Amino acid sequence: MLNMNKNVKYKYIRAFVAGSAFPIMLAVVFVYFLGMLALGFGEGIDKIEFLRLPIILGVVNILHIGLLQKWPAKNLNKRLWLVGILLGIALVLPANFISDTTEKLFGLPGPQILTIIAAPIAYGAIFRYILKYLNRMVGLN
């Protein structure tokens, strides 16, 4: 019988839960207020799009824990910033150039340079300042 350390058992499930916990709360609040206020902000946006974000962040956190744990612990903050910025770029470029998500959200035509700059920084900050502590709470870092 294998003697599994408590910190190793279910590591990837805990990584998914930690990665998706914060965006689930934000997505529910955002969709609720968007539906309740009905101010025209985000009119035409499929609200299911925002519910995909927790799954994406959970999977990215699994990849972060599984692949990037080899980096020294002293570089944890840099690693979290890097993962968040790369995720922000990966999500904002298709939203700006392939789909019309930013046009539906902000009502302005064409790609928005502000979202191209702000989204990677925001995702980096989420990974560095929020996900770091959620990972620590579930015993991953």
Image (cartoon, rainbow, N blue to C red):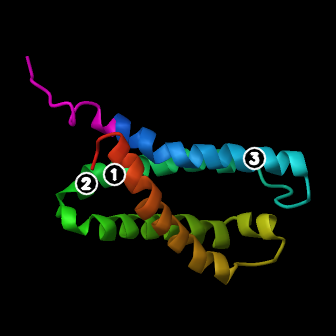
In this rendering, the label closer to the viewer, 2 or 3: 3
The x, y position of residue 56, in whole percent, is 50, 50
What's the amino acid at mark 3? Val
Q: Which residues lie in the magenta part? A: 1-12
Pick the quarter of the image with the N terminus: top left
Q: Could you say which disc has been placed on residue 67 in the image?
A: 2
Tell me the distance, in whole angstroms, between the alpha carbons under discs 1 and 2.
6 Å
Q: Are marks 1 and 2 in contact (CB under 8 Å)?
A: yes
Quick check: 141 above or below 122?
A: above
Q: Residue at x 45, y 47 (%)?
A: 19
The x, y position of residue 115, in whole percent, is 64, 75
Tell me the distance, in whole angstroms, between the alpha carbons under discs 1 and 3.
27 Å
Q: Residue at x 66, y 47 (%)?
A: 27
Q: Give the mark nearest the N terminus, 2 or 3.
A: 3
Quick check: 95 above or below 8?
A: below
Q: Is residue 10 magenta?
A: yes
Task: Give the dominant element type of the magenta stretch: helix, strand or loop.
Answer: loop
What's the amino acid at mark 1? Leu
